[in-house]
Amino acid sequence: MYSRAAVGHGEDFVHHVGCLCHRPEILHFTNRINGDLTRRGFTAGMAASILSLGLPNFAKAQSTATPEDRKGKLVFTNFRLFDGKSTVLTDGKVVVVDGNSIVSVEDAGGALPEDAEHIDCGGRTLMPGLIDAHWHTMLAPMPLTSLMTAELGYIYLVASAEAERTLLRGFTTVRDVGGPVFALKKAIDEGVATGPRIYPSGAMISQTGGHGDFRPTYELPRKGGDISRSEELGAAAIADGADEVLRRTREQLMLGASQIKLMAGGGISSLYDPLDSLQFRPEEVEAAVQAAADWGTYVTVHVYLAEGMKRCIKAGVRCIEHGQLADEEAARMVADNGIWWSLQPFIEAAEGNQYTGAQAAKQRQVWEGTDKAYAMAIDLKAKIGWGTDVLFNPKGTANQGRMLSIMTRWFTAGQALKIATGDNGEMLALSGERNPYPGKLGVIERGALADILLVDGDPTEDLGLLADPEANLKLVMKDGRIYKREV
């Protein structure tokens, strides 16, 4: 959705990476990865290299957000509670965390565990970790041109650094809807790297010429079994016909996808497809839906156009990404069938003028449809999710919290906050048996996973507080471990 224009990553970070690359073990690591790419492809090569070269020690050395070592229970006191289920704050509660779970939410004044550490929150707001339901861990922090030309080791270093910053912005969970994120997810889960929980889709499955087809035209026609750079990276999988869609879907499930992402309509940043184009025939969408259902999970689709939404809903998809060009019939189908509508606040104030020519015209068409889409979703009481869809834009990644604050154009601050916590947590549960983190997310309640933020102020009154996490987030906890603490 965002600009492809090349934007610097920061001189200090580039200098640091450049110095690291002269170390013999890193040169060996990079050469091994590049060899693995040639033989087996991006994801498999990265996984093999990580396991065989002992990357954990290197990755840990780069982390600046080392979680606190803690044993026993932790008790939060003296706060106002946003629980992710209501839209207002509650006073007079105590929250107890043991291990990676919230074990109790009790009225203040009772007996507290004697063997626990206590944190006095100073009257601030205690709330669940934020969830970005449309994120691209590997693709967001680099321009497209860099992704298509950079060495694989560098891509992973950049993505890992951005994952840490994502967590420190208060986003303890992301649903990654396109990109080769499996190895980084594994590293984060094992404590090798620092970042949010990741619900991975793997490669975006696209038809030839669709929104996920990044090939230059000189690579056409496709020759035999040749694959493009974006397919080597694991960013996209090009499939034409139900059998190819079935195969590509099964490949992503084999790699560990928690949900499948199809490109079912035109896009803004892509060069070839009109915004109003229909992509994938009904039988192709049905092939992906059936394969995902056979593995206990679901398909979500990139689509703006009303006719594309209707086709996909009839084929059995469970979630719509975008949908800014929906008509009333499509919106009603979303609501009546219990489909999740993962909308993004795409307006000029949020994004600015990033494109020229045909791409700029497509972007403006989406902006003009955003207000209407939100109005219909609210009026019909559809299940609404929220995400940012930052893509190929290293500057845009820092705007996650600001993109959330723009939701007050259509909702109260409390309603928007509930969407980005408890509601998004319900959406993630669509993964069913493929849920990589069984347990409740996005809520503060007994038995929920301990993803907790402490905000200096009241975000149900001023959602803009979350746009400046460095100043206003006083504590960031994920999975019961504290990564930032200023109380």
Image: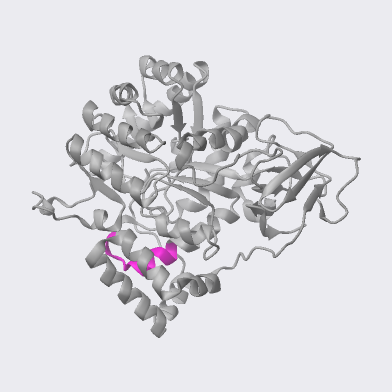
Residue at 17% x, 39% y is: 240
- Residue 352: name its quadrant: top left
On the question of residue 330 being in view, the answer is yes
Residue at 38% x, 38% y is: 295
Give the colour scheme of this rendering: one colour
- Image position, residue 467 (x, y; %): 59, 47
- Image position, residue 296 (x, y; %): 41, 36
Q: Quadrant of the N terminus?
A: top left
Decide: is 112 above or below 72: above
Q: Does 17 sit left or right of 119 as displayed?
A: left
- Image position, residue 44 (x, y; %): 32, 61
Query: How many numbered discs sit on the rendered protein?
Result: 0
Q: Is residue 140 magenta?
A: no
Q: Does 211 sit left or right of 339 as displayed?
A: left
Q: Which residues are magenta?
A: 148-158
> Which is nearer the eye, 401 or 187?
187
On the question of residue 270 being in view, the answer is no
Q: Quadrant of the C terminus?
A: bottom right
Q: Does 263 sit left or right of 226 as displayed?
A: right
Instruction: From the image, give the main secondary structure of the stretch colored magenta.
Output: helix
- Residue 15: name its quadrant: bottom left
Decide: is 63 above or below 323: below
Q: Is residue 155 magenta?
A: yes
Residue at 36% x, 29% y is: 317
Q: Does 323 sit left or right of 166 as displayed?
A: left
> Which is nearer the eye, 450 or 423?
450
